[in-house]
Amino acid sequence: MSKTTLSILCVADRRNNRLTRALRGRGHSVIEAYSGDQGVAVAVGTFFDAVVLDQGLFVETEEWSLARSFKLVRPSICILLVSRALQLKHRRKPEGVDSIVPMNDLPEIVRTLEQLVLG
């Protein structure tokens, strides 16, 4: 994959920063947010190529309004949902989400993110 550095907003549980470390390990710039409201507020004033959402934080979010909120702030932004679910093959993507990847597959998360943004 290209050596292009992506700017990524990672909205995830602060106790689980493996994802952030994996993205930074690939040379990407990562800003962390620990709540949906904090993430949207950061995105309003800062450019990001992509947002990574940890599904575990958003079980209470009705109809995935958080992904739609990011798309309203910046329609072209890529939204990657990382899920703790083991089977994702037949799952329908929530509105605003561009791709879903299992949380336990860090290499696939990085590959999918780079593919979404860089093509």
Image: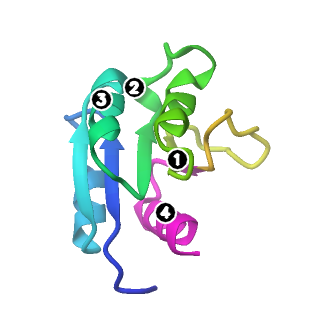
Q: Which mark is residue 57?
A: 2
Query: Is residue 16 in sight in this rendering?
Result: no
- Earlier in the chain: of badge 3 and badge 4, it is 3
The correct choice, above or below, for 113 with respect to 5 in the image is above
Give the Cα separation between the discs numbered 3 and 4: 22 Å
Mark 1 or mark 2, earlier in chain: 2
Q: Which numbered dot is residue 79?
A: 1
Q: Could you say which quadrant of the image residue 63 lies in?
A: top right
Label 1 residue SS: strand
Q: Earlier in the sequence, mark 2 or mark 4?
A: 2
Q: Is residue 114 above or below residue 20?
A: below
Residue 9 vs residue 54: left or right? Answer: left
Q: Whole-Å distance between the Cαs marked 1 and 2?
A: 15 Å
Reading the chain from its start, which is encountered first: label 1 or label 4?
A: 1
Residue 41: numbered disc: 3
The residue type indicated by label 1 comes to Ile
> Between disc 3 and disc 1, whose residue precedes?
3
Residue sitting nearer the eye, 96 or 45: 45
Marks 1 and 2: which is nearer the front?
1
Q: Is residue 30 magenta?
A: no
Task: Say above or below: 96 vs 22.
Answer: above
Given contact means CB atoms under 8 Å apart, are the residues at marks 3 and 1 in contact?
Answer: no
Find residue 69 and report its horizontal and vertical position in percent: 50, 28
Q: In this figure, which residue is indicated by the disc labeled 4?
A: 113
Q: Tell me which residue sits at (33%, 52%) in the image.
A: 47
- Say what amino acid the circle numbered 4 marks: Leu
Label 2: element kind: helix
| 108 relative to 99 in the view: left or right | left
Which amino acid lies under the numbered mark 2 shown in the image of this protein? Answer: Leu
Furthest toward the bottom, the residue is 2
Residue ID at (32%, 33%): 39
Measure the alpha-carbon separation of dots 3 and 1.
Answer: 16 Å
